[in-house]
Amino acid sequence: MDGGVRIQKVGIIGYGYVGHATGYSLSQVAEVSWHDPKVTGSRSFNELARWADALFVCVPTPRGETGAADLGVVREVVSQLAGLRITSPILLKSTVPPGTTEGLARSWPTLAMVCCPEFLRESTHIEDASAPARVVLGWSSTASESTRALVRDLYVRRFPSVPRVELPSLAAEFLKYASNALFGVKVSFANEMAELARRVGVDWEAVRSALVLDSRVGDGHLAVPGPDGRYGFGGSCLPKDLAGLLAVAAALNVELEVVASAVHANRRWRGTEA
């Protein structure tokens, strides 16, 4: 970048599998440190916030009682950063409902907020973060042109050949939910087809192998049983995010019949886990 100004020190707040994968990936082009009292090597929150040229928020957004994402930890972290008068870019990797990043920007207008959703599988999070299909950058109203240039430069340095998608933060947040909803629908579809194939007397794996030769059909999420050896979808993302998306739709009086059906079908495969 002109003038040599760029992100050289990356701070990660929340060092679970998303934070760890983010830090590992970016460590090839920047010095990385983190705050997470549960992980050895953690810096204090205030020290990390003042040290970093950019801060990635990777804290949990668990499913609340109504199914909606619980944003309590996210809001607490952002409030603390505002109190410290942080001017470096703040990139929100936690999965949040559409409108969250812009809402945080309105509440704390001094913060340069960016939505940067992750698209990781928990079982292969390091590999996925190191070789993403695309980089998604969602700009809020407080992300100035200089902030955008800094963030772009970081990702261009690390992933020079990876497609970069720049969207309003609202659209970037929606993209994350839409991606996981599609995966959930695919898993439920595959489980139903596998069961029908069994009843008919057909080997589902042979059918699946032929099905995915069609370039319009992606191979992912069609294996039955899944990577955990069980039927249906589990893990920490799909059940939570499909519930979160349904909660967003319900608040807007929009019925997502296909997504709701996928969740309902998954309950049959996984019991009350979904």
Image: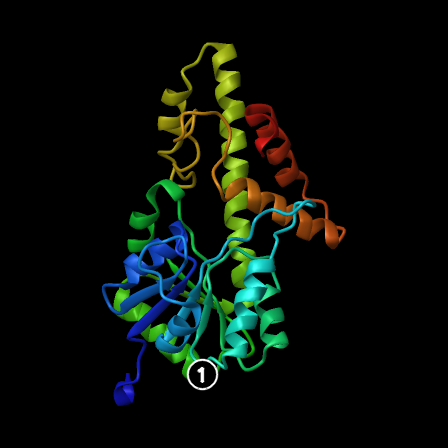
Q: Residue furthest left?
A: 28
Look at the picture and state if 86 lies above or below 207: below
Pointer 1: what residue?
145
- Which x, y percent locates residue 167? 50, 68
Q: How is the image coloured?
A: rainbow
- Which x, y percent locates residue 44? 40, 67
- Which x, y percent locates residue 67? 66, 45
Residue in the image at 52% along x and 66% along y: 77
- Residue 160 in view of the camera: no
Q: Is residue 142 left or right of residue 91?
A: right
The residue nearer to you, when weighing 89 against 150, is 89
Q: Is residue 135 left or right of residue 263?
A: left
- Give the image quarter of residue 152: bottom left
The residue nearer to you, when weighing 121 against 49, is 49
Q: Could you tell me which quadrant the N terminus lies in?
A: bottom left
Q: Could you tell me which quadrant the C terminus lies in?
A: top right
- Residue 145 in view of the camera: yes
Residue in the image at 64% along x and 34% along y: 261
- Give the image quarter of residue 174: bottom right
Query: At label 1, which amino acid type do we have?
Result: Glu
- Which x, y percent locates residue 186? 50, 36
